[in-house]
Amino acid sequence: MGSVTKLALFGAAAFTLVACGEQASQHQQTTDASASSDAAPIARDDNQAFLDLVRRQGEAILGVSPILATELGIGEDVAGQAYLATLGGYGFDAHEAARRMNEDFLLDLQSIDRSSLSGLAAVTYDVLDSAYRSAARRNQFQFGGATPIGFSLPDSGDSWAVTPYFVTQLTGPHLALPRMLQTQHPFSSVHDVEAYLSRLGDFGRAFEEVIETVGSDAAVGVTPPTFVIDGALNSISGLISVAPADHPLIETIRLKAAAIEGLDPAAIDAFAARGAELLETTVYPAYAALADELKRVREQSTPDAGVWSLGDEGVAYYQMALQAYGARNRDADEVHELGLSEVARISAEMDSILNGIGLADGSVGRRMIALGQRPDNSFPNTDEGREDLLNYLRAAVDRVQAVTPQWFARLPRQPLEVRRIPVHEQDSSPGGYYTGPSLDGSRPGVYWINLKNTADNPKHGLKTLTYHEGVPGHHFSISFNRMIEDMPLLRTVLSYSEYEEGWALYGEALANEMGMYADDPEGDLGRLQAELFRAARLVVDTGLHHKQWTREQAIEWMVEATGESRASVTREVERYAAIPGQACAYKLGMIAIEEMRAKAEAELGDRFDIKEFHDVVLSVGSAPIGIVGRQVDLWILSKKAESGQ
């Protein structure tokens, strides 16, 4: 899935690794020269003044977004004193502040002469101009929260969690906060442990604000579909069904505090006891109150899966979402037809391979179901089987890592870990996702896998999931870019699914070129099935939100078209219902990157260098796909200029 990727606040940022010193500098100089070739010489002071403004804007966002600051590993000197001890704002005041901040940022940008900028500053201007305008369009809708920048919500917890619904089975503070505390809150000192406990104590205030937003949205007729509310209630039930002392939030204290030098077992036990008391007196009651509010608004919800059910506002919201996720001026009907065309093309290729391995009867989807149900194609659904599956994924990462120097000029420094999705999240989580490393590299990238039922992840699809979530997918684009030294901090809070998910899907296909499926037709079928799945998303997402398909209709169509298990398809369709438009970003982004590469290959001929092409695409950072395309065009021009063409 990807991705994304699940990350705090605005989510996964794409930076460029500036290792390889001279080569990276030379590439930046070339890009800068190309970007300004049609303008007069530019004073460095203009670029620096603009980047100083961007820095101040980034610090302003961090000052009101403690979850984002934690996810990025920002120090208190930037994010504010004691930010590690607080949670974000989730109520009316926070949303109005986000709207005002967006308006101020737009005014700041409009005071800058774009023609006076070059290189990184010019690209940053273009990205921020798009981000602020996208946020302003989103903020016109008086439901689901507000954002100062981009198409994301303050401290909502997911880079892809732009949704008309503030709480769903997949998104919202009720899931983001415990995930952040377990995986991203630092534990390097007693001060950090105390801050962790303070955050537990802040759950009551934070959830009062979440409830305020859920209630105010319902008051204007905006409630999630009934099954989305039920999924959120199930998640809450799982979170608070454990005895406080045994909760993963308390186990986190015991495990991570043990690494703090000088902290003895008795002190750790005392911290854990305080945490358990806070869960019992503050955290659990906060979740129970949110559950009560969700049950109340559920009474006015409907089973209608599409945002069209919100009336004209819903229709407008969906068209806005499609554009934000890379539709590039295609309307919903055009996206739907593109999906149908791609499903037909990929299915034909799969049919040929299936015939070659002796599976010739039935539709492609039915034959893929048969392949997935083969006893030798799944790991046992036991603790031992789950551990074997994790080791299989780790070995797949090692194999692809070994050949990446042939395809990339620069490689990430940060390690990649493979972990199981926490049990309390697995019922409503996708098959896998990725969380990025901290800015300083002290926290690794993590590829999470859903192991509720190992049959949901048959062996033939595991390689492709690994290449998408790990290498050369999300781990490369995100961890590369988080090492850049001169990328403005504000760019790190932006996430563009069409770029990040488009790159990860492109990475799946690239793995085939890298030889990862040699002599493995079943694995290649897994790759094609994954691409088919993303093409089917174009059909199903537009079907739900534009053509008024029911949840059941979407499930039936997708199972038949893709051969994925009904359980996994059900989770996916419910995800599309909760997050309109985002599922389209994968295929739309991949198509755009493939078009960029085809154009470069055609225009450069034998001067085309795949390592350089990948470097250019990754060096832009997370950005609207059109801006990435413009940078590729500049690179093509610079390559032609080198040869005198």
Image (cartoon, grey):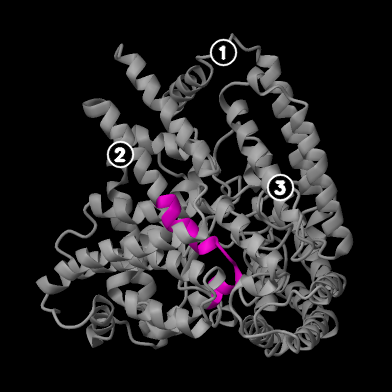
Which residue is most to the top? 41
- As measured in the structure, the alpha-carbon distance from the residue carrying label 2 to the one carrying label 1 is 28 Å
Provide the residue span drawn in magenta.
574-590
Q: In this view, does 20 lie to the left or right of 283?
A: left
Q: What element carries label 2?
A: helix
Q: Would you identify the image quadrant in which residue 242 lies? A: bottom right
Q: Which residue is drawn at 76% across and 49% down?
A: 148
Mark 1 falls on what kind of element? loop
Nearer the N terminus, badge 2 or badge 1?
1
SS type, badge 3: loop
Q: Name the residue under label 3.
A: 149
Q: Which amino acid does label 2 sit on?
A: Ala
Q: Where is residue 190 in the image (x, y as percent from the top left)?
A: 77, 61
Tell me the residue that label 2 is attached to. Answer: 598
Q: What is the x, y in percent for residue 495?
A: 59, 50
Numbered label attached to residue 524: none
Where is the C terminus found, in terms of image quarters? top left
- For residue 41, which quarter of the picture? top right
Query: Mark 1 highlights which residue?
Result: 39
Judge from the rendering whether residue 239 lies leftward or rightward of residue 428; answer left or right. Answer: right
